[in-house]
Image: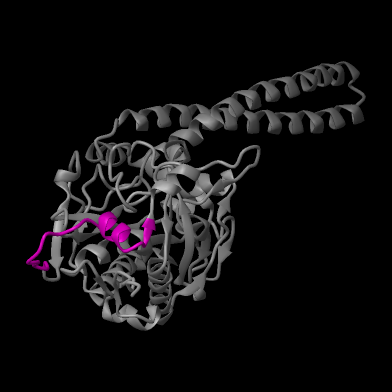
Amino acid sequence: MLDPKIIREKPKEVKESLRRRQLDPKLVDAFITKDKKYRKLKVGVEKLRYQRNKISEDINRLKKLNKSAEVRKKIKEAKEIPGKIRKLEEEIKRLEPNIKNLLLTIPNIPAKDVPIGKSEKDNKILKKVGTIPKFKFKLKGHEELAIDLNLLDIERAAKVSGARFYYLKNELVILNYALQKFALDFMKKKGHQLMEPPFMLKKRPYEGVVHLEQFEEMLYKIHDEDLYLIATAEHPMAAYYMNEILNERKLPIKFAGISPCFRKEAGSHGRDTKGIFRVHQFNKIEQFIFCRPEESEKFHKELLKNTEEIYKALKIPYRVVLMCTSETNKLASKHYDIDLWFPAQKVYREIASCSNCTDYQARRLNIRFFDKKGHRKFVHTLNSTAIPTQRTIAAILENYQQKDGSIKIPNVLQKYCGFKKIEKIKIKKKK
């Protein structure tokens, strides 16, 4: 969340931020009104407590002077104070959740170079990398390729689990794990601590990690438990230091998390229903950094570069997109997407996101450090997809397909797979 001090002292700046995101600036007015009332009530409570202490001193002094009438008057006055305090505290308790909700709702302030826009059409394509492959035969989509090679079964998955689930089979299972091992080795060389986090989170840390009231429809809730299945390893890694003060000398702290990810994909009905591009369960390697505020822009570029290097190594054409204000997630001040080329569809599809959340997420999670001058500050948090394996598999199938229906394995993955090509098993005819 934003520093409440910024909203109080720079309301015009925060309102402009909301306008740039195509959101209602009246959220700022609502916060300021409730915040003023809240702080006035808190001052009232402190005054009454001071008054109660002062009356106690007066009573003791008057008793020593044998002024019984005045003592009785003061005692009567003192008895009225707890009720007044209780009344004010009840108003404070009613206000607190409203103020907290407003703070959790007002999004991060977009960086100055984030383009203003209302939809994905206003995103800015920064660059395209790689040569678009040319094919001299009719292309197949990744689902058709995988089914033809006995690598994927969606129909039976739908029978036992429902839509948007799948069985990976044979070489595709190996390719899935090969991508994960390749990405983990890559991230380790980049200085990231490898981590397999819990696959479930309680509500409190999840409220710190995302706008839960808006994200909750995407999450799978465990029945009768204070637990949610994670949507990405980013979330438990972000919450790792919740309510802690970090050693400034150890910053930056870099993690690479591996996990399955579980998403309802609510609101995406009718989109990407074929194959394994948009599914309820997938595997992903995620990058995460805790750093000093002055270093977050540098590390944002570093995370983006890491993901780019992975797809350069896989030799899959991609583009980098700077998301406009309305498409930038609410926790981030700046957000890049990396889109891979899907030749069967002749389109770039989003494969990875890379966000600088500044101190917005750390404030929600209460993660701080002391700087060299002894000032307590909130760390900055950054995250980026390193590789989502199912979407990457889909891109490999389409970009590396051959005329005979086989699939070449990218050179960098061959040592992890133990084979160079996936092809149909030839059944020998009986003589």
Can residue 109 be found in the magenta stretch?
Answer: no
Question: Residue sitting at 39 percent across and 63 percent down?
Answer: 293
Tell me if 157 is positioned left or right of 9 in this view.
Answer: right
Secondary structure character of the magenta stretch overall: loop
Is 133 or 299 nearer to us in this picture?
A: 133
Q: State the quadrant of the N terminus.
A: top left
Can residue 134 be found in the magenta stretch?
Answer: yes
Quadrant housing residue 288: bottom left
Position of residue 356 measured from the top left corner of the image (x, y, whole percent): 34, 58
Position of residue 345 measured from the top left corner of the image (x, y, whole percent): 16, 53
Tell me if 354 is positioned left or right of 140 in this view.
Answer: right
Residue 220 versus residue 257 in the image, above or below: above
Magenta part of the protein: which range? 132-152
Residue 23 versus residue 378 in the image, above or below: above
Residue 221 versus residue 360 in the image, above or below: above
Position of residue 286 measured from the top left corner of the image (x, y, whole percent): 41, 64
